[in-house]
Amino acid sequence: MSAALTLATPEHLDRLMILVAAFHAEEGIAQSDDMRRAGLAPLLDGIPHGVVYLIGPPRAAIGYIVITFGWSVEFGGLDGFIDELYIRPGVRKRGIASETLLSLPRALAGAGLKALHLEVDQTNETAQRLYARAGFALRPNYHLMTRRF
């Protein structure tokens, strides 16, 4: 099984909606299909705020990753945030997520990305080990804080 990445386009929306709904159900994220579609469609249409990559063969994707873009004075330019990463349960523990996390930053650095961030549940030790193997580290003295609107 390969972690080949395909930049998702509008033609992939229906397949992607199924994967995102599965991820949200697994994570307990309550969201309507309309809201999911509103969050995904502009990314697939090519807005500059982020991208979605399908993982595996595009016609039978085994997962996806969403990266959103921002700007950081601290990091010296364009930075990204892994918003969602999902691999179907039946193909987990085969190195696909690791391969994705190791190859994607190299490609994004070529496009000018200076840093890539993510958040992880403090109790999810499996994900923390995965991210550490891919070169992500906790930033001392920092916590992600959020205000919803």
Image (cartoon, rainbow, N blue to C red):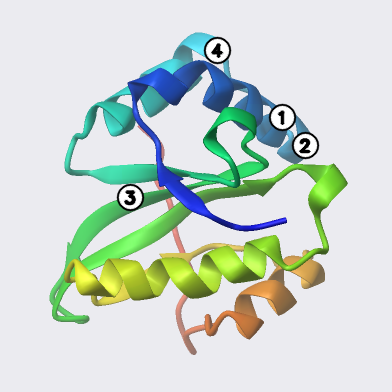
Q: Amino acid at mark 4?
A: Asp
Q: Residue at x 57, y 13 (%)?
A: 32
Q: Residue 68 has which mark?
A: 3
Q: Amino acid at mark 3?
A: Thr
What is the spatial separation of the Cα atoms under label 1 and label 3, in whole angstroms?
A: 20 Å
Q: Residue at x 40, y 27 (%)?
A: 40
Q: Amino acid at mark 1?
A: Ala
User: Residue reaching furthest top?
Assistant: 34
Q: Nearer the viewer, mark 2 or mark 1?
A: 1
Residue 121, picture quadrant: bottom right
Mark 3, other Cα within 10 Å: few <14 / some 14–19 / many ≥20: some
Of the numbered discs 1 and 3, the one sitting upstream in the chain is 1
Q: Which residue is mark 1?
A: 22
What is the spatial separation of the Cα atoms under label 1 and label 4, in whole angstroms?
A: 12 Å
Could you tell whether 126 is left or right of 131 in the image? right
| Element type at mark 1 | helix
Q: Mark 3 and 4 residues: CB-CB less than 8 Å, in contact? A: no
Q: Amino acid at mark 2?
A: Glu
Label count reads 4
What is the spatial separation of the Cα atoms under label 2 and label 1, in whole angstroms?
A: 6 Å
Q: Look at the picture and state if 106 lies above or below 55.
A: below
User: Residue reaching furthest bottom?
Assistant: 140
Could you tell whether 81 is left or right of 28 in the image? left
| Element type at mark 2 | helix
Q: Mark 2 and 4 residues: CB-CB less than 8 Å, in contact? A: no
Q: Which residue is mark 4?
A: 33
Q: Which residue is mark 2?
A: 26
Residue 25 position in % (x across, y down): 74, 29
